[in-house]
Image (spheres, rainbow, N blue to C red):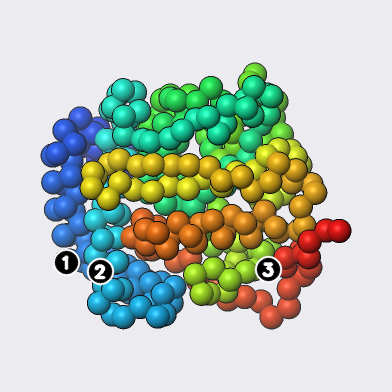
Amino acid sequence: MKKLSTRLLLFILTAISKLSWKSLYRLSDFFRFLIFDIAHYRRNVILDNLHNSFPDQDEETIKSIAKKYYRNFTDIIFETIKLRSISKTDLLRRIEFDTSFLDHYYEQKKNIVVVAGHLGNWEMLNLFASAKLSYQIVVVYHELANNTFEDWFKKVRTQFGTEMVPMKDAFVKALTPRDKPFIYILINDQSPVPEKAYWTRFLNQETGVFRGVELIARRLNAPVLYMGTLRDEWKRGFYKFYFELITESPKDEPNNRILESQINFLEKDILKQPDNWLWSHRRWKHNRPENLQPSQLLEENKK
C-alpha cells in the first residue's frame, strides 16, 4: 500500500512538471497559503532564526523577510518538480553565469572544489552546470530514505550528466580518477556534530561548520571556489550565480581559513537577499562545546 501511494504521488509530480511555468507558480502560491498561512509550517523556527540573525531589525522587517521567504520556499519546491521535464534550452535561459572564470582552470586540466550554501534553487544550478560546462559535475548530497523517491529525484539530478555522491562516500569519491577535470560541489551550511565542527561567528551566532570541505580540498590540493546565488527580483525562476576564489593552494592555508572565507562570502550573500536562504532549517540546534580542540578553531596566518 505504501509503495502504491508513493508511485501515485510520483505520477502526480511528473504530471505537475509538465505544466507551464505560469500554472506552476499559481500552484506554488496556493501551496504557500496552505503550509504557511494555514498550517504555519516551521513558523517559529523561521522567525527565531531571523530574530537571532538580525537582532537590530524591527518586527515589521523580520515579518517582511519571512513573508518573502515563504514564497521563495514554495517556488523552489515547484521549480525542482519542473526540472523533471525541463528542456536544456529552457534551463539555460533561466540562469545568468559567466563561464570565463572557469575556462583557464579547465585548460590547465585542474579539478576544482566548490563550496556553496542553500541559496536560491541549488537543484536548478546543478543541472545548469552539467548542461553548460565542460567539466564533469560531481555533487555531494544526502540520500532520501525512500528508495522510490530517491530514484525519481536522482533521474532529475543526473539527466544532463551530473554525478551524485552520497555524503558517506564524499571523501573516497573525491579521490576517484575521472576521464576529464571535475568540479566537486558541497553544500556546507547544514548543522554538523558539534564536537567535530569548526566553530565561528555567522549571522551574529556561534555556528558549527562541517570540516569535510577543507579536508577534501587539502587532499586534492585543488583550487577552492565559493559559489554564490542571487535570485532575480523581478522574474520568478531566474537566477544568477557566480564564483569567488577562496584559494588555489589549500595545503598552504591556515587551518579552517577555507571555511572561514566561505562563511564570510555566504553571509554577504544572505545580507543582500535575506529571503533567498533556507531559514526553515534548524541550523543552530547545537550549542558550541565549552572546550574546543585546535582543529576546531581558526589557525593564525602562516608565516
Dividing the image into 4 quarters, which one contains the C terminus?
A: bottom right
- Residue located at (52% from left, 34% from top): 164
Mark sitting earlier along the chain (2/1): 1
Identify which amino acid the numbered label 2 is placed on: Ser
Mark number for residue 71? none
Q: Secondary structure at mark 1?
A: helix
Can you give x and y, in whole percent of width and height, for residue 217 in the image?
A: 70, 44
- State the CA–CA distance, disc 2 to disc 1: 18 Å
Can you give x and y, in whole percent of width and height, for residue 136 in the image?
A: 56, 26
- Residue located at (27% from left, 50% from top): 233
Position of 274 with respect to 206 (left or right) is left
Q: Is residue 101 visible?
A: yes
Dividing the image into 4 quarters, which one contains the N terminus?
A: top left
Q: Secondary structure at mark 3?
A: loop
Q: Are marks 2 and 3 in contact (CB under 8 Å)?
A: no
Label 1 Cα crowd, 10 Å radius (few <14 / some 14-19 / many 20+): few
Label 2 Cα crowd, 10 Å radius (few <14 / some 14-19 / many 20+): few
Q: Are marks 2 and 1 in contact (CB under 8 Å)?
A: no
- Residue located at (41% from left, 31% from top): 128
Label 3 Cα crowd, 10 Å radius (few <14 / some 14-19 / many 20+): some
Identify which amino acid the numbered label 1 is placed on: Ile
Q: Identify the residue position indicated by label 3 in the image.
A: 195
- State the CA–CA distance, disc 2 to disc 3: 36 Å
Mark number for residue 38? 1
Identify which amino acid the numbered label 3 is placed on: Glu
Can you give x and y, in whole percent of width and height, for residue 155 in the image?
A: 40, 29
Mark sitting earlier along the chain (1/3): 1
Residue sitting farthest toward the right? 303
Mark sitting earlier along the chain (2/3): 2
Position of 298 with respect to 44 (left or right) is right
Q: Identify the residue position indicated by label 2 in the image.
A: 64
